Image (tube, helix red, strand yellow):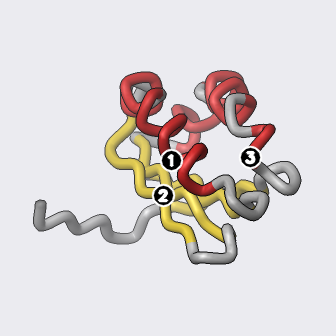
Amino acid sequence: MFARITQFKMKPGMRDAAEAKMNELKDQIMGMEGMHSFTNVMNEDGTGFVVAVVQSEETSNANASKVAKLWGHFAEFLEGPPSPAGFDVVVHWDKG
């Protein structure tokens, strides 16, 4: 498995609108090839991370254009472009 961890920063007051947009796009996000899990975390100041765990780095790379299109839906909410990084998953535990 492979994790793409993307740091972002929302503009002040945009959290609720961004969350609503994310919920609208849930089926597209979760429907991407090889998606195992998706987590979005954010502090009150709008700083946050997306952690997407997928089948492999190759799968993640193949999804790049879809991911870019999805991030495009959030452009009006973001202070700047998101900053992604990729990692091999050592363990992935999920009790749920």
Q: Earlier in the sequence, mark 2 or mark 3?
A: 2
Q: In front here: 69 or 34?
A: 69
Q: Check disc 2 and report the residue beneath it.
A: 40
Amino acid at pointer 3: Phe
How many neighbours does mark 3 have within 10 angstroms: few (below 14), some (14-19), or many (20 or more)?
A: many
Please give the label number shown on residue 19.
Answer: 1
Task: Please identify the quarter of the rendering in which residue 63 is found.
Answer: top right
User: Which percent across, then down, holds residue 81?
Assistant: 84, 49
Label 2 to label 3: alpha-carbon separation: 15 Å
Tell me the number on the disc at residue 77: 3
Nearer to the camera, 29 or 53: 29
Sequence-wise, the earlier of marks 1 and 2 is 1
Please give left or right for residue 21 compared with residue 33 in the image: right
Identify which amino acid the numbered label 1 is placed on: Glu
> CA gap, disc 3 to disc 1?
10 Å
The percent position of residue 5, horizontal first and vertical second, equals 59, 60
